[in-house]
Image (cartoon, grey):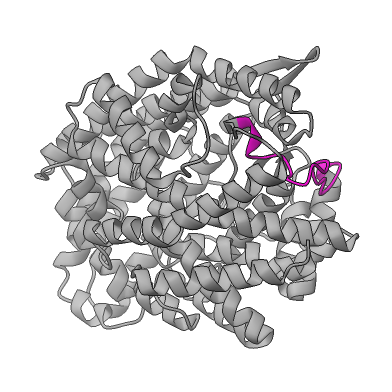
Amino acid sequence: MAPETILKRPERKFLPEDFRIQQWEDLQPFFDLLLNTEVKSTGDLRSWFRNRSELESIISEDLAWRYINMTRYTDNSTYTANYQYFVENIQPKIAPFSDQLNRKALSSPFIQELEKEEGFTIMIRNLKKEIDLFREENIPLFTEISLEQQKYNQISGAMTVMIDGTEMTLQQASVLLMDTDRSKRDRVYHKISDRRLQDKEILDESFTKLIDLRNRVALNAGFANYRDYMFKNLGRFDYSPQDCFDFHDSVRGEVVPILDELTLERKQKLKLSVIKPWDKSVDPEGREPLKAFSSGKELTDKTIECFHRIDPYLGQCLEIMNTMGHLDLESRKGKAPGGYNYPLAELGVPFIFMNATSTLRDMVTIMHEGGHAVHNFLTRDLELSDFKHTPSEVAELASMSMELISMDHWDIFFTKTHELNRAKREHLEDIIETLPWVATIDQFQHWIYENPGHTLEDRKKNWNRIFNLFTDTLTDWTGEETARDYLWQKQLHLYEVPFYYIEYGMAQLGAIAIWKNYKENSKKGLEGYMAALKLGYTRSIPEVYAAANIRFDFSQKYIRELIQFVRNELNMIEA
């Protein structure tokens, strides 16, 4: 794989090379063909699955580009309309055909032979799950949900604030919360907070609508609540809600006390009698914020070099994406918030979207999304698209491990030893802060969907109850109660990908374990990491973790072991 390569999609075997999706009528003949294909042997069934995989990859990639363009330019009505057209006029037509194809596959007398083969076992388990969940009456509800979810990006993408005469996105403005001038941090915090709160009613209303729609989907499918529906929908065969509750308890017992220690240390170093929310991002030594890069090009070039140092193959993956224009990194007005790595199912070269300014967090984000991207390259040649669709617990293992593995090479971004040490320390402290936040969002989701008929006052009350379980006890929120009441609204996962959040916590633990292996033996640790990723979704989650020589474990004892390792690493970093 040469660095300057522009990769081409594989030759199509089932659809014409020049095929493009304009409308549903373009697609239907191929679904009909799959439905009417006679399967006379195990070989025929394998070929049938390959043809279906090709069709679904083309559809997936078409939708991907519509979503990518819409989020890159939220103010472009054409891109928005193209995405909406797919969601309203194509996606609903696909669902019943997919169900019929699933049933055709599982009714084949040859399915049992194929089920014995690696990868097919997991895929067929998922097909059975899809059949169990499918309800014709949910199709229009899914369309409504997709359109309602889209509002969050439009509302958030339009949020800007004026700071000292300059219009900024909230991502750009948040960088100023690292300013050493406390009065400026105070002012910026309230500008950001006030701007978010301007839309609190409309975001509350949208969330209430989403809860109602999702609950109806669950009830239609025969589930007691949407949480139980989503556990099956997300294919959580390897753990239960109780495992999530165990994770919450372990984090509360092992991580939250450290959060208190770090906050006290921050308060003392800043010489504050009271620590406020706007004091949480500034350097406690009073130093200016770390600046990891000054432009999108510099971020790109240094990231590629960093990946090259870990392994030449990893650097080549990022170089190919850059050559093909698959990186959109810098924050700008009209761009949706957040960041993602979007797999392109047919081409096999993903797209990275993010809102970089210049911060350490931005640098870590590209390491994170780069880990996802590498995962896509490593699974590119797997036989079927389904084999590449890894569960989030594995996908996030790829990204979060890369954040930590890459730390040995951050001197590319920070050439001064004291800045490099500071960057490592800030990132490790951020991990300790992230785990309680993951537990907060996840426990909030469990409560939301266990109580779908709750009032806005109930929502506010229980958000604060849960928030207080996992936050430090020193930060003073006096006068900021309204901002705290609506902190959850900044978490796009609640709106766009419900129940997709606990994975970050589980994968963070796995990433620490991979990093621990890497620190002990970099060659062996990296081999384990890449061996696990190459499996895609041809094995269960515990088996993928085992391939990386780590455990899929949420016990307090295991979390204590991993967090102690992080504490020891923190202690070894010179201030």
Q: How many labels does the image show?
A: 0
In the rendered structure, the answer to whether residue 436 lies left or right of residue 28 reads right
Residue 540 position in % (x across, y down): 34, 73
Query: Residue at image x 70%, y 59%?
Result: 425
Q: Does the magenta stretch include residue 294?
A: yes
Asked where in the image residue 49 lies, by quadrant, the reply is bottom left
Residue 129 position in % (x across, y down): 21, 58
Residue 205 position in % (x across, y down): 34, 17
Placement of the C terminus among the 4 image quadrants: bottom right
Closest to the observer: 324 or 167? 167
Q: Does the magenta stretch include residue 492?
A: no
Residue 189 position in % (x across, y down): 63, 24
Placement of the N terminus among the 4 image quadrants: bottom right
> Is residue 279 something that shows in the picture?
yes
Question: What is the span of residues highlighted in magenta in the rendered image?
Answer: 278-296
In the rendered structure, the answer to whether residue 2 lies left or right of residue 117 reads right
Query: Residue at image x 20%, y 47%?
Result: 229
Closest to the observer: 198 or 344? 198
Above or below: residue 268 compared with residue 180 = below
Above or below: residue 165 compared with residue 299 = above
